[in-house]
Amino acid sequence: MDEQAREVSVDADVLEAVTEEISQSRSVARQMETDAERKGIPVELQGVRYRIYETEKPK
Amino acid sequence: MLTKSAWNGVQSLLDNYFKVRNDDHVVVVYASKTVEHASWVSAALRLRGIPVEKVWMIPLRDPEFSQRFSVALPEPTAIRGRLIVLTFERDSLSHDSLIRAGLSQFDADRRMVFRVISTCDELFTVALQESPDQLSAKNTTILETLVPSKALRITTPGGSDLSVTLDSKKHRWISNRGVWRPGSFVILPAGEVATFPASIEGKLVADFAFNVNMMTDRDARLDAHPITVWIENSRAVKYECVSSEVTSFLNECFYGYCAYTVGELGFGTNASIQTPISLNSHINERHPGVHLGFGQSNQAPWVVGYDCNIHLDLIAKGGTVWIDDRETPLDLSKVCKSSNPHPTHTWDEDAGSSQGITDLEVEDCCGILTSEGLRLFDPRTSEDRLNVQGATSAR
């Protein structure tokens, strides 16, 4: 059986709730990004690599 | 995409990892790249009637995060249950100290922090299908078996053959199992036991995936073109891969960033993870097999005598561990669950935020501890130079 066909969809009420949540969060994220850029705070890290994490050291 | 399988993973997160209750209060922190997956969880919480606040963040450097985070937190007296903070990032692990500072007003016994690194569909459809109780029991078996041991021989179906000595009195063990303890952050995805090898030599054939602490869009899967690394005196001395692109990447890691010291001996325990994913992800590292972490170690620099910015995990498929003079080895693909309590001496977190944003330049990639402090390693000097060879056999 095709793998995509085997995947079962979620219930309609769940999908509706999730869709609304995503829409609201995306709207907030876009607004926050606009505000940050207006203040000169970079929101995208392009072309430069960072130490994104380090293994936790004992205190 | 939200499938039934992914939704089951969301429910597993809430029921098996959080063991969420109706009197809990949840704060979900998300970045722009993780909006969708964070929203799956916040929607699930709302459908259960559990209070949830959401906080947006810029990964790594966000001068206004503290303010946004503190505004989203409830008053400690207003929570009857627990405060659960859940953060979602895809490529990073940010703002540890800011989160700890923001939560300092809450009782340690009632503030739980779960930090997702490698947010993607497979976190929910695969990695979260394994419960913390299952991971904890398997980790316990590995710890009970390996912590007291002195010498290991590790082989894999792909051709690895490693000789390892351990010193558990000197080197700490990390057990990442998705179980929260007061004062610790839970790193997700979960499912690993790791330590530092006192000595290691032999050959590693990494035929599952890599995981590196740099941002990269490179396909992390190695099943089509495994990497073979030869190790002497705990250092990579030669490596090969039929892919010229992967070899170029290794050249950069090993030679450009001095990541040739073996800084970690790791064993994945999440049996749900059987197929590598393309994302540069911790999910691959939790595969039930052996992996070596090159470069940055999981110990304090003063314990191991060096430090390094880069950490490159090379992950093999499966593994058999022969312990001291025992006749029966440990098969990493079939670890039994211990019925004993999990040891209390291990560390829970195997990753944390960097102390600051650092451009990874060769000049300050790593250092060696001397009597005068940390000295930069310089591979150009005869004193420090190691013979690291790379071979390309592109066909």
Image (cartoon, coloured by chain):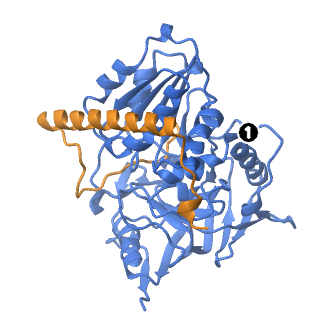
Chain colours: A orange, B blue
Nearer the observer, B362 or B38: B38
Q: Position of residue B95 (x, y in %)?
A: 37, 35
Dot 1 falls on which chain? B
Q: Eyeballing the image, is B21 above or below A11?
A: above
Residue at (78%, 37%) from the top-left corner? B341
Q: Residue at x 48, y 79 (%)?
A: B239
> How many numbered discs sit on the rendered protein?
1
Q: Quadrant of the C terminus of chain B?
A: bottom left
Q: Residue furthest front?
A: A12
- Measured along the vertical axis of the image, is residue B249 above or below residue B277? below
Q: Secondary structure at mark 1?
A: loop
Q: Which residue is mark 1?
A: B343
Residue occupying the far right of the picture: B327
Q: Position of residue B268 (x, y in %)?
A: 63, 56
Residue B111, position in %: x, y? 54, 22
Observer-nearest of B232 and B13: B13
In the image: residue B65, left or right of residue B126: left
Most distant residue in the bottom direction: B395
Observer-nearest of B380 and B119: B119
**Can the viewer see residue B203?**
yes
- Pointer 1: residues within 10 angstroms few (<14), some, or many (20+)? few
Q: Quadrant of residue B199?
A: bottom right
Q: Is residue B165 left or right of residue A25?
A: right
**Residue A38 in the image: above or below residue B22:** below
Q: Could you tell me which residue is drawn at 48 percent across and 20 percent down?
A: B51
Which residue is pictured at 50% across the width and 39% down the height? A12
Q: Position of residue A15 (x, y in %)?
A: 47, 40
Amino acid type, mark 1: Pro
Residue B262 appears in the rendering = no
**Residue nearest the viewer, comparing A35 with B296:** A35
